[in-house]
Image (tube, rainbow, N blue to C red):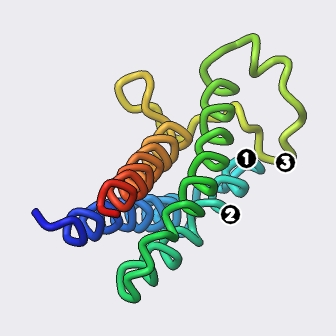
């Protein structure tokens, strides 16, 4: 596969992950009426722009945008990981800061005993981080 096609494929996978995560979070809040907690809002702040940024990068062929998507996905992923630990590790949940009206320890979903909304967001951020990293590595090797 040609280097530009590889890079475009990586960015498309990252964009698709961001789109699925964004639509999923909107489904949970707008259709199922799950009220997002404060940490969920912070995760959304880092996920939603990735759909637009990666989409524009693909259309305009601005592949170096991956540097910025790495940063956004790393920060968002860190928040997701912390939120997941607040939900699943009693010590962290009991000693975390107050989360507002909706408790961050709440689990609207708990599929298979470990898949919660922050876990799903974390998977999305990891996919975006990895595809962005692969994009930058491919650009570097292509020079």
* Crowd band around label 3 with a 10 angstrom C-alpha radius: few (<14), some (14–19), many (20+): few
Number of disc labels: 3
Q: Nearer the viewer, residue 116 or 139?
A: 139
- For residue 140, the mark is none
Question: How far apart in space, not on screen, are marks 2 and 3 (Cα)?
Answer: 19 Å
Q: Where in the figure is residue 83, as x and y percent of width and height?
A: 67, 35
Label 2 secondary element? helix
Helix, strand or loop at label 3? It is loop
Residue sitting at x 38%, y 32% = 111
Residue 60 place in picture, x, y as percent: 40, 88
Name, please, the residue furthest toward the bottom: 60
Which sits earlier in the primary sequence, circle 2 or circle 1? 1
Instruction: Return the disc, 2 or 3, that comes first in the chain's sequence.
Output: 2
In the visual, does 28 lie left or right of 74? left
Which numbered disc, 1 or 3, marks the residue that appears first in the sequence? 1
Mark 2 lies on residue: 45
* Looking at the image, residue 82 lies above or below residue 29: above
Task: Look at the image and tell me in which quarter the C terminus lies.
Answer: bottom left
Give how far apart the Cα atoms at labels 1 and 3 are.
12 Å
Name the residue at 28% across, 70% down: 8
**Residue highlighted by disc 3:** 101
Q: Residue furthest left?
A: 1
Residue drawn at the location 36% of the way across and 79% of the way down: 58
Callout in the foreground (2, 1): 2
Q: Quadrant of residue 11?
A: bottom left
Q: Is residue 28 left or right of residue 90?
A: left
Looking at the rendered image, the disc whose residue lies closer to the viewer, 1 or 3, is: 1
Provide residue 69's location: percent of width, then percent of height. Answer: 54, 61
Quadrant assignment for the N terminus: bottom left
Of residues 83 and 107, the one nearer the viewer is: 83
Residue identifier under label 1: 39
């Amino acid at each position: 596969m040609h280097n530009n096609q590889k890079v475009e494929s990586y960015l498309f996978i990252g964009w698709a992950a961001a789109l699925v995560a964004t639509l999923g979070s909107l489904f949970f809040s707008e259709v199922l009426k799950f009220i997002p907690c404060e940490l969920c809002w912070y995760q959304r702040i880092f996920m939603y722009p990735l759909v637009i940024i990666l989409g524009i990068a693909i259309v305009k062929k601005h592949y170096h945008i991956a540097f910025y998507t790495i940063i956004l996905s790393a920060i968002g992923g860190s928040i997701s990981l912390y939120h997941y630990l607040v939900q699943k590790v009693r010590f962290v949940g009991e000693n975390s800061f107050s989360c507002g009206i909706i408790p961050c320890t709440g689990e609207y979903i708990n599929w298979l005993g470990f898949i919660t909304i922050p876990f799903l967001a974390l998977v999305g951020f990891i996919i975006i981080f990895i595809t962005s990293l692969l994009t930058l590595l491919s650009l570097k090797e292509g020079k």
